[in-house]
Amino acid sequence: MALVGTVLPPLPARRRTAVRLWLPLTPLWIVLAPVALVLAPLTLLVPACRHMRPYRAALSLGAVLLSLSGTDVEVDAHHTLVRIRIF
């Protein structure tokens, strides 16, 4: 006795979802830099931050944000592609 099977039609191909985002850090830095510099002396009131230099920390954080300019991040999942461009 032979086994007879049925062949199912192939499932329709799912379209791949692409998500493209852009993140402008330079304008964000320009807007938030004065706030960070005004609030920097308040870190001296926090006991855990007394050993830290507040203005140097604020400027270092700004330097890190500005150095990320031109970065492209791509995340490739099974059915989704996410691209983030930082400028």
Image (tube, grey):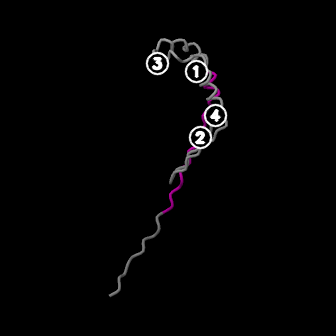
Question: Residue under circle 4?
Answer: 68
Residue found farthest to the left: 1
* Distance from the alpha carbon under mark 4 to that under mark 1: 17 Å
CB within 8 Å, label 1 to label 2: no
Q: Amino acid at mark 3?
A: Ala
Q: Position of residue 9 (x, y in %)?
A: 45, 70
Q: Residue at x 51, y 61 (%)?
A: 13
Residue 48, numbered circle: 3
In front of the other: label 1 or label 2?
Answer: 1
Question: Residue under circle 2?
Answer: 84
Secondary element at tag 2:
strand
Q: Residues within 10 Å of mark 1 (few under 14, many from 20)?
A: some
Q: Earlier in the sequence, mark 1 or mark 3?
A: 3
Q: How many marks?
A: 4
Q: Position of residue 47 (x, y in %)?
A: 45, 15
Q: Residues within 10 Å of mark 4 (few under 14, many from 20)?
A: some
Question: Residue under circle 1?
Answer: 57
As drawn, 1 above or below 55: below
CB within 8 Å, label 2 to label 3: no
Q: Residue at x 50, y 54 (%)?
A: 78
User: What segment carries the magenta color?
Assistant: 12-31
Q: Which of the two residues, 11 or 65, is positioned nearer the viewer here?
A: 65
* Distance from the alpha carbon under mark 4 to that under mark 2: 12 Å
